[in-house]
C-alpha cells in the first residue's frame, strides 16, 4: 500500500474521510481491513491504481491509472440475503451519475453498468456477517472514467468502454466522484429510512435484461429464457421455454435474441 491522504466530505451521513492511495492491491481489501478495525460507515477508500483489482468469482478487474476505483464501508441493519440491495443502490447511483454526462446507461443484472452494450462499471459487494445479519459491507465500485479501455478489453475478450471514450474528452474526476457519492448517499438514506421499493423501481427502469430473452451460464450449465422479474432475494427470474420459472442467484447472462419465447 502506498501513501494515503484523507479528505473530508461536506454533508450528511457519509461525513467521513476519503482515504486516497496512489496504489493498493484492492480498495475492497483495504476497506475491509479498516472495517474490521471499526471504521465508521461512510468511509471511502480510493486508489489511482489497483494491482489486484478483483471482480466476482475470483475474476480480475483491470485498474490502470485514470479509472475511478473505490470502496465504501456500509453498516446497514439488514440480513445477509438483502446484501444485493446495496449493489442495486450503487448501480442505480452510478447510472444516474453517468446520465448527468448525457449518457444512457443500462444496468445488467447483477452488477454491471453498460453504455451501448459495453461495460463501463462493475460493482463488487463483499460482506462480513454475524447470525445472518450484516456486520459490515464493503461495496467496491470500478468505473472506467479517464482510462482508455476499449482496445485492451477487446484483446482480452471482453467489451468495455470509459466515460472519456464515450465523450471524447477527459472528465473532472473529483466532480464525478462528488456526483456519485451524493447519489449513493441519497439512496442509502432513503433505503435506511423509507425502504427499498422505489430504488428497485428505478433499477428496473434502467435494466438491460428485464423483458428480454437472455442466455444464462450458471455453474457450467447454459440455458435461455425470458428475464421477467427480480425476486425478494435479488435473484433474476427467468421463464424457460417449457414455461417453468427458474431463479438465478449468481451467474453470467447475455442477451440472446429480441424475440420472446
Ligand atoms: C465486476 O465483477 O464487475 C466487479 C468489479 C468491481 C471492481 C471494483 S474496483 C474497486 C473495488 N476493488 C476491487 O478490487 N474491486 C472493486 P465481474 O462481474 O466478475 O466482472 C469481471 C469481468 O469484467 C472480468 O472478467 C472482465 O471480463 C471484465 N473487466 C475487467 N476489468 C474491466 C474494466 N476495467 N472495465 C470493464 N470490464 C472489465
Image: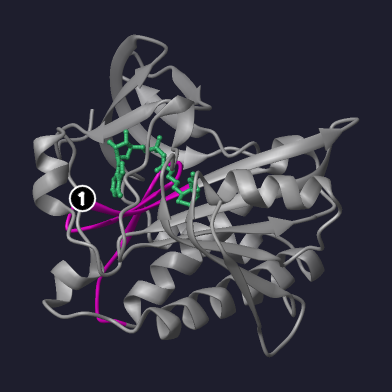
**Disc 1 secondary structure class:** loop
Label 1: few (<14), some (14–19) or many (≥20) C-alpha neighbours in 10 Å: many
Horizontal side, residue 12 vs residue 95: left or right: right
Left or right of residue 153: residue 8: right
* Res 48 visible: yes
From what the image shows, is residue 210 above or below residue 100? above
- Residue 53 found in image quarter: top left
Q: Is residue 243 left or right of residue 93?
A: left
Viewer-proximal residue, 180 or 243?
180
Residue at image point 47% right, 33% down: 56
Percent coordinates x, y for residue 145 in the rendering: 30, 67
Q: Tell me if residue 19 is in the magenta stretch.
A: no
- Dividing the picture into quarters, in which one does residue 153 lie? top left
Q: Residue furthest right?
A: 131
Q: Which coloring applies here? A: one colour
170 over 208 or under it: above or below: below
Question: Vertically, is 251 above or below 231?
Answer: above
Residue 42 or 212: which is nearer the viewer? Answer: 42
Which residue is under mark 1?
160
> Does residue 241 show up?
no
Q: Please name the residue shown 49% across and 74% down the image.
A: 180
* Quadrant of the image where one finds ligand 1: top left
Q: Is residue 107 magenta?
A: yes
The quadrant of the image that shows the C terminus is top left
Can you name the residue that lies furthest to the front here? 3
The region drawn magenta spans 101-123
Q: Position of residue 51 (x, y in %)?
A: 41, 44
Ligand 1 has an atom within 8 Å of the beta carbon of the residue at disc 1? yes
Residue furthest top in the image: 220
Q: Going 38% across and 19% down the picture, which residue do you hit? A: 243
Amino acid at each position: 500500500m502506498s501513501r494515503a491522504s484523507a479528505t473530508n466530505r461536506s454533508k450528511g451521513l457519509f461525513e467521513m474521510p476519503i482515504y486516497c492511495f496512489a496504489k493498493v492491491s484492492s480498495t475492497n481489501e483495504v476497506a475491509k481491513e479498516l472495517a474490521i478495525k471499526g471504521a465508521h460507515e461512510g468511509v471511502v477508500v480510493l486508489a489511482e491504481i489497483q494491482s489486484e483489482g478483483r471482480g466476482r468469482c475470483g475474476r480480475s478487474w483491470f485498474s490502470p491509472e485514470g479509472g475511478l476505483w473505490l470502496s465504501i464501508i456500509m453498516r446497514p441493519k439488514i440480513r445477509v440475503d438483502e446484501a444485493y440491495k446495496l449493489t442495486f443502490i450503487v448501480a442505480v447511483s452510478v447510472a444516474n451519475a453517468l446520465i448527468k454526462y448525457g449518457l444512457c446507461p443500462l444496468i445488467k443484472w447483477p452488477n454491471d453498468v453498460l453504455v451501448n452494450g459495453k461495460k463501463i462499471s462493475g460493482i463488487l459487494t463483499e460482506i462480513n456477517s454475524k447470525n445472518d445479519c450484516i456486520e459490515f459491507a464493503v461495496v467496491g465500485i470500478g468505473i472506467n472514467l479517464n482510462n482508455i479501455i476499449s482496445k485492451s478489453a477487446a484483446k482480452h475478450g471482453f467489451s468495455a468502454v470509459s466515460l472519456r471514450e464515450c465523450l471524447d474528452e477527459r472528465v473532472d474526476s473529483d466532480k464525478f466522484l462528488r456526483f456519485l457519492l451524493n447519489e449513493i448517499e441519497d439512496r442509502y438514506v432513503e433505503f435506511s429510512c423509507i425502504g427499498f421499493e422505489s430504488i428497485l423501481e428505478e433499477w428496473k427502469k434502467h435494466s438491460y435484461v428485464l423483458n428480454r430473452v437472455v442466455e444464462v451460464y450458471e455453474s457450467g450449465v447454459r440455458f435461455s429464457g425470458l428475464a421477467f422479474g427480480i425476486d425478494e432475494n435479488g435473484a433474476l427470474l427467468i421463464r424457460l421455454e417449457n414455461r417453468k420459472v427458474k431463479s438465478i442467484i449468481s451467474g453470467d447472462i447475455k442477451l440472446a435474441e429480441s424475440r420472446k419465447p
